[in-house]
Amino acid sequence: MRFNYRTVFISDMHLGFGGTHAPELSAFLKHIDCERLYLVGDIVDILALRARWRWPVMHNQVIRRLLKIAKKGTHVTYIPGNHDDAFRQYAGLDLGGIKLANRAVHRTACGKSLLVTHGDEYDLVVQHSPIMCLLGTWAYDHLVTLNRFFNSARALVGLKRYSFSSAIKSRVKSACTFISNFETALLTEAARRNLDGVVCGHIHQPKIHHTTLPGSNKPLLYANCGDWIERATALVEHHDGSLEVIDVEALLALHQIEVKPLQQEPVPLDPPLPEEQPA
């Protein structure tokens, strides 16, 4: 089974963080064909790796699949975010067919020009309060870990997963205000560049909608790829230029595609001692 798209946008994989849906991501990458693939930031979670080195075998598998996609001729663009911002200094380099860029402009099949950026550059908390950002990252990581245990218990009794952070974002007024301001800031930048909209990640809220900025009659497109921590989503462009956020877990299940983590060979702690010879 192959999934054929014109363009695929993926953000917030957070490879190196233990809570990412790497098996689902690897299975999805194995079964897609596309002309362009945009990696829209927070792909490798350097912040998490600095705090604690954790690199499961499946995360290597994801990297191998990305390199294979590039080798087969897909144009792959990696746009770093705030968790992998160390890569921003290498914008312009080509790493195994994956091109690094701080931002890009994508033109859809129906002629729309979209700014592609992770989005953290338009997040005032990230830009002006690094300590608050680090505290927020620490709290979020622990919330995700707790959420994983909680959902394991729910799965035992046949219940669907529940996201603590998504519930907080949807119910806390300040979080809703932040998301609204974030969208407005990105759309204002797209309008300033005379573009038709924006594709982003960063806030882990998959969404597609059109809106009009105050003082303008031009509708602008806001599209957020979502993430691979709280859920498993990707933004895709079909061959007619239409955009859609897809639930990858549901897609794989619908087509009965097996999601199986790689099994790592156990490593012996010490070599066996030689047997003593009788005197």
Image: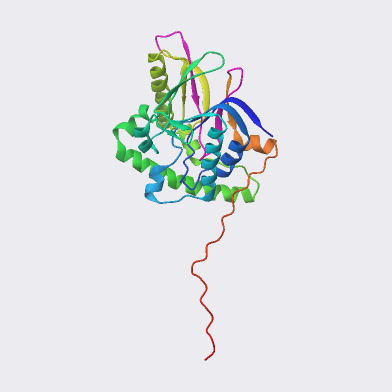
Most extreme residue toward the bottom, as rendered? Answer: 279
Give the residue drawn at x 41%, y 21%: 184
Read off the magenta span: 214-241
Left or right: 264 as drawn, with respect to 199: right
Task: Name above or below for residue 240 compared with residue 120.
Answer: above
Front-most of 47 and 131?
47
The image shows residue 35 at horizontal and vertical percentages of: 57, 25
Task: Please determine whether, in this image, residue 166 is positioned above or below residue 117.
Answer: below
In this rendering, the count of numbered labels is 0
Q: In this view, does 113 lie above or below 18?
A: above
Compared across the picture, whether 216 is left or right of 245 comes to left
In the displayed structure, would residue 42 be above or below residue 53?
Answer: above
Residue 269: image location, x then y, percent: 49, 67
Q: Can residue 144 be seen in this view?
A: yes
**Magenta-colored stretch includes residue 76:** no
Q: Work out whether residue 171 can be spotted.
A: no
Residue at the image position 44 percent from the left and 37 percent from the top: 42
